[in-house]
């Protein structure tokens, strides 16, 4: 599609939507198994860009459903069903499905969600693709959790755990737990690996009741890519598999020569491990709430030795509880600082690796010598989108092209803010300024700066019933991505059929 001036671009997209009435979907609402309902929603979007790339904050953290390339049209249909019958039954059933069709430079039909589940009390068993947030961080105005953001389609898995924070017995309802244990599968069409498995678990604790003024939170999440096939650092192309190695990936223990004859696996933990250890504080006032959080990054023994303690995601969120009906209001804002430049330092401590079984230094986040296509799903970063795939950056280093990312040493300052205009229009903005240094193995010649922003507007009108109409305007300027301006218009509606 030819490039348009920004004004013509916006007008052409708006005209294409004037005669369209359809139903929509809110990606910020996470699935829940706690209420009996059946919701159907459908949506149409029109996307236009001044270049061949969609602006960062229009296509990022949208569960992989917004095209990263050029302009086009999109349609979405989804259904979520939660039911218990009879109402005295102890079990509640759930199912959901979503189909997205994008037509444009890269036309695709996607199935970002399809799952079935059963829930009893506060425990649930779910199988399939389901939208999910993991980690102590703001999931709407922030940049997304470091290791598990909303930047890709959900990975299909079987998961058992709690559906919310539940009180721990014998603690007087002051200590709460939230966690799960799951196993999943990566896509079969990965560039380098195949038959790759996912092991994932998390455990978080909270001190403070649901209505307490102060709550303290802490916990961890743990992810492992393992058991597939790779042409790198393997014997006969096979990564360690089997029940003995499964227990090693669950516990994080290194391999041994009896079950992992490959020297790479014998000297390392089996599989590609990564996660965060999180801390959080919630403070509830009469007219406001505060949330402060910190995510500490680990991929091997570097965090244990406090060598990469500088790295992590830091966040602060402020929310107002009351609206005063002004023509311009700010109801919430999020400030974040993401830093991944340390990685334990530039030197890899080989002696520490061999003798003490813990790698120290040059952690190379989201890359792995065995899993060369890295911490990704269908080419998109599973974790923070600021660790960018090599294919998406104009500063990609040729000598590092066979690894997933050539840019994992970054610092990011981020502001997210939302409010209301004229009492009827909801607005939200995200503004991010990043400095990028490449990797230790292939550093950029100098720091590469990038600014990305988006302004979202949404209002509700009456077109065959309540209908949400939204517009997003995104901008990228800097040296990491091409200079781009784009807009996306959306018409959507949701209704209950049960």
Image (cartoon, helix red, strand yellow):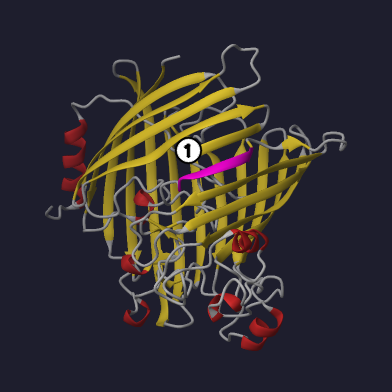
- Within 10 angstroms of label 1, few (less than 14), some, or many (20 or more) residues? few
At 83% from the left edge and 35% from the top edge, which residue is drawn? 169
Q: Which residue sits furthest left?
A: 2
Which of 90/473 is in front? 90
Q: Tell me: 264 left or right of 26.
A: right
Q: Tell me: 306 left or right of 24.
A: right
**Span highlighted in magenta in the image:** 155-161
Is residue 156 part of the magenta span, yes or no?
yes
Which of 202/449 is in front? 202
Q: Quadrant of the C terminus?
A: top left
The spot of residue 188 in percent (x, y) is 36, 55
Q: Quadrant of residue 348?
A: bottom right
Q: Is residue 342 visible?
A: no
Q: Tell me: 250 left or right of 388.
A: right
At 18% from the left edge and 41% from the top edge, which residue is drawn? 11
Q: Is residue 110 visible?
A: yes
Query: Dot 1 corresponds to which residue?
Result: 28
Q: Quadrant of residue 167?
A: top right
Which of 41/235 is in front? 235
- Relative to 51, say whether 85 is above or below: above
Q: Main secondary structure of the magenta part?
A: strand
Q: Quadrant of residue 44?
A: top left
At 47% from the left edge and 70% from the top edge, which residue is drawn? 367
Is disc 1 placed on a helix, strand or loop?
loop
At 46% from the left edge and 62% from the top edge, which residue is drawn? 228
The spot of residue 54 in percent (x, y) is 29, 54
The spot of residue 107 in percent (x, y) is 21, 47
Is residue 343 part of the magenta span, yes or no?
no
């Amino acid at each position: 599609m030819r490039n348009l001036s920004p004004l013509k671009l916006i007008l052409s997209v708006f005209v294409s939507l004037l005669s369209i009435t359809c139903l929509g979907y809110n990606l910020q609402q996470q699935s829940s198994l706690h209420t009996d309902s059946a919701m159907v929603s459908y949506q149409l979007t029109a996307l236009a860009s001044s270049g061949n790339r969609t602006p960062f904050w229009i296509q990022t953290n949208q569960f992989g459903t917004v095209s990263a390339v050029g302009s086009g049209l999109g349609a979405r249909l989804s259904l979520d069903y939660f039911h218990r019958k009879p109402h005295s039954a102890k079990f509640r059933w759930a199912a959901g499905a979503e189909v997205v069709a994008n037509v444009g430079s890269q036309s695709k039909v996607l199935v970002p969600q399809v799952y079935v589940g059963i829930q009893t009390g506060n425990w649930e068993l779910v199988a399939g693709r389901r939208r999910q947030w993991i980690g102590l961080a703001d999931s709407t105005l922030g940049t997304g959790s470091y290791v598990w953001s909303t930047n890709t389609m959900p990975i299909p898995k079987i998961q058992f755990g709690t559906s919310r924070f539940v009180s721990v017995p014998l603690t007087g309802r002051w200590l709460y737990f939230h966690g799960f244990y799951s196993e999943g599968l990566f896509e079969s069409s990965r560039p380098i690996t195949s038959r790759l498995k996912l092991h994932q678990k998390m455990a978080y604790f909270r001190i403070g009741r649901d209505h307490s003024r102060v709550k303290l939170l802490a916990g961890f999440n743990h992810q492992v890519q393992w058991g597939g096939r790779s042409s790198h650092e393997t014997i006969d192309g096979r990564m360690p598999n089997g029940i003995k190695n499964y227990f090693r990936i669950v516990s994080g223990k290194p391999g041994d020569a009896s079950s992992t004859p490959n020297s790479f696996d014998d000297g390392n933990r089996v599989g590609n491990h990564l996660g965060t250890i999180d801390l959080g504080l919630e403070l509830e006032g009469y007219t406001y709430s505060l949330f402060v959080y910190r995510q500490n990054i680990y991929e091997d023994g570097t965090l244990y030795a406090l060598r990469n303690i500088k790295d992590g995601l830091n966040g602060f969120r402020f929310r107002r509880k009351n609206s005063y009906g002004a023509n311009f209001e700010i109801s919430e804002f999020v400030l974040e600082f993401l830093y991944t430049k340390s990685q334990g330092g530039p030197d890899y401590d080989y002696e520490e690796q061999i003798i003490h079984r813990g790698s120290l230094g040059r952690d190379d986040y989201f890359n792995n010598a065995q899993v060369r296509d890295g911490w990704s799903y269908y080419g998109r970063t599973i974790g923070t989108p600021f660790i960018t795939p090599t294919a998406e950056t104009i500063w990609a280093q040729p000598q590092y092209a066979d690894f997933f990312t050539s840019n994992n040493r970054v610092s990011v300052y981020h502001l997210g803010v939302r409010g209301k205009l004229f009492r009827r229009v909801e607005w939200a903005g995200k503004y991010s300024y990043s400095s990028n240094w490449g990797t230790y193995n292939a550093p950029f010649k100098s720091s590469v700066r990038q600014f990305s922003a988006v302004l979202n507007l949404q209002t509700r009108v009456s077109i065959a019933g309540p209908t949400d109409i939204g517009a997003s305007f995104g901008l990228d300027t800097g040296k990491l991505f091409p200079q781009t301006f784009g807009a996306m218009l959306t018409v959507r509606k949701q209704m209950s059929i049960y």
